[in-house]
Amino acid sequence: MENENSKPYKIKEAVLKDAAYRKLIKPELADELYDKVLAIVVAGKKYRDPEYSAQQLAKDLNTNPRYLSAVINSRFGQNYSCLVNEFRIRDAQHMLTDKRYKNLTMEQIGMAVGFSNRQSFYAAFFKYKGVAPHKFRAQYM
């Protein structure tokens, strides 16, 4: 069995907690916030901005950050950071397999999709894809 210290990038498994506050979410409002989160974070590509936080998103949506967090957890099944990183990794996958971006370094790709440094890009990419970005690229180039 693999121990915690042998995992690359010290990735920990996500633990889903049953929080009582999730039962207080109003379904209609949650659906509305879900659509707005998708519009801002995904369609508006705010995930590419490393400075764009859950607090800023809550402010832009005129809602409470804790309530927004509960909605993101209940509707997306993950927290804000994981949600944002999921879309960053999707973008990175595209860039790593598209020959138009073959001259970009891993750091440049990580920055282009919204990671603030190379280490966080590598850790997130490995978490989602199970392989380092440079090895992923090598499979396609």
Image: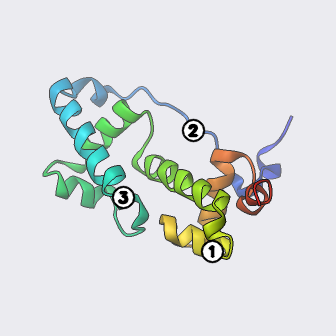
Mark 2 closeness class: few <14, some 14–19, many ≥20 residues within 10 Å:
few
Percent x, y for residue 52?
A: 34, 64
Residue under label 1: 107
Q: Amino acid at mark 3?
A: Lys
- The residue located at (57%, 38%) in the rendering is 14
- 66 is higher (above) or lower (below) than 96: above
* Residue occupied by mark 3: 45
Q: Could you tell me how far apart the alpha carbons at marks 2 and 3 are, in whole angstroms? A: 25 Å
- Residue at the extreme left: 62
Task: Looking at the image, tell me whether mark 2 or mark 1 is earlier in sequence order.
Answer: 2
Q: Nearer the viewer, residue 17 or 122?
A: 122
Q: Position of residue 42 (x, y in %)?
A: 36, 50
Q: How many marks?
A: 3
Check disc 1 and report its element: helix, strand or loop.
Answer: helix
Q: Quadrant of the N terminus?
A: top right
Task: Choose top left, top right, bottom left or bottom right for residue 110.
Answer: bottom right
First reached walking from the N terminus: tag 2 or tag 3: 2
Height in image: 68 above or below 141? Answer: above
Q: Residues within 10 Å of mark 1 (few under 14, many from 20)?
A: some
Q: Which residue type carries mark 1?
A: Glu
Of circles 2 and 1, the one toward us is 1
Q: Position of residue 88 (x, y in %)?
A: 50, 56
Q: Residue drawn 42% across and 44% down?
A: 79
State the residue lying farthest toward the front: 100
- Residue 34 sits in quarter: top left
State the residue in front, 43 or 47. Answer: 43
Which residue in the protein does label 2 denote? Answer: 14
Q: Residue at x 73, y 46 (%)?
A: 130
At label 2, which amino acid type do we have?
Ala
The numbered mark at residue 36 is: none
Measure the alpha-carbon separation of dots 2 and 1: 26 Å
Q: Secondary structure at mark 3?
A: loop
